[in-house]
Amino acid sequence: MTLAVSFQDVRDAAARLAGHAHRTPVLTSRTADEQLGARLFFKCENLQRIGAFKFRGGYNAIARLDDAQRRRGVLAFSSGNHAQAIALAARLQGVAATILMPADAPAAKMAATRDYGAEVVTYDRMTQDREALARALADERGLSLIPPYDHPDVIAGQGTAALELFEEVPALDKLVVCVGGGGLVSGCALAAAGMAPGCEVHGVEPEAGNDVQQSLRAGRIVTIDVPRTIADGAQTTHAGVLTFPIIQAHVRDVLTVTDAQLVETMRFFAERMKLVVEPTGCLAAAAVLQRVLDVKGARVGIIVSGGNVDLARFSSLLAGGA
């Protein structure tokens, strides 16, 4: 099967993003290394523009539009990070953006999306189909639809996070990446295949939302109900038709972690590394730090995908709230 995105697409995206996306730091923790008997390298996309890796894919997708598409504008649907990414990337490139967001999206993410200049249209994520709503609105207004993960230019852009990690730390045995709809993990898996073919790629989902894990086991895309998890960025119901074949080809396995394990990982980042990381951003690290994945003796790259969390919510979770 010919995949929708190639390693060269990731390289080309990196060239477009140069000077626009932050080259985020790769941090280490002696404490974590000693506890696990491994070498961990955290690629801190929580320090990316808009606070998440999503800026990479959003900027790359808009950069690929033709002049007519730019004049008409773009539309995206997102619970928050992709919304902010498209809003900022569109503003930077002089393109109008409309964002379809669930009414219960984190307040900080919705406010930031509006602050970047986008029009926000809300919907009920529990009763309405965001993809159908988005297609109808895009058709009605003549806008270019840029979905949060199932788009070749988005996938290629997200893969540049791992590309940078491999450039800085080339000899990795494992790469661990969070999984929602699969845009980040599929892009990063392509980067791994091109940069370090011997590196095992593992995805991590919330336990309550293991649609991609189920899909890998079944050999087809499995759709689930909207998962109830604190990892709001991974409340997807199915993998993408573009992302799933890449995951099948290049991802060794998809693991799951509980919400409680995510909170423990948030606490580790805050106390030990002085980093604010949102629950979704902790997925990959949680699988390693909570020993879901055995990494003893290995050099492990971990994508820390985002840091956009309301401070009140952050404090409540660390204090034991729901």
Image: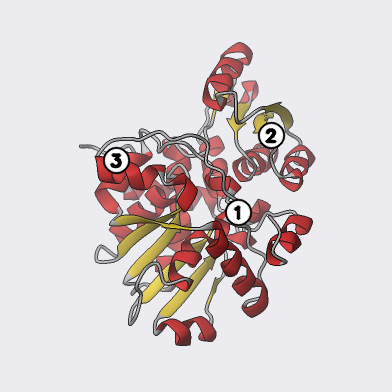
Quarter residue 176 falls in? bottom left
Q: Are marks 2 and 1 in contact (CB under 8 Å)?
A: no
Q: Nearer the viewer, residue 138 or 11?
A: 138
- Whether residue 60 is visible to the viewer of this picture, yes or no, is yes
Quadrant of the image occupied by residue 321 = bottom right
Per the rendering, the mark at residue 159 is none
Q: Horizontal and vertical percent for residue 237?
A: 47, 36
Residue, disc 3? 245
Pointers 1 and 3 in contact (C-beta within 8 Å) = no
- Residue at 42%, 69% (x, y): give it: 301
Which quadrant: the C terminus? bottom right
- Dot 1 amino acid type: Ala
**What amino acid is at disc 2?**
Gly
Q: Which residue is mark 2?
A: 94
Dot 2 or dot 1, earlier in sequence: 1
Image quadrant where one finds the N terminus: top left
- Above or below residue 246? Residue 48 is below
Q: Is residue 5 visible?
A: no
Q: Name the residue carrying label 1.
A: 52
Instruction: Describe residue 156's horizontal placement relative to residue 244 as left or right.
Output: right
Q: CA distance from mark 2 to mark 1?
A: 21 Å
Crowding near the residue tagged with mark 2, few <14, some 14–19, many ≥20 C-alpha atoms within 10 Å: few
Q: Nearer the N terminus, badge 2 or badge 3? A: 2
Q: Point out residue 193 in the picture as x, y percentages from the top left corner.
A: 29, 57
Q: Is residue 3 left or right of residue 34?
A: left
Instruction: Calculate the distance from the C-alpha at mark 1 to the C-alpha at mark 3.
Output: 24 Å
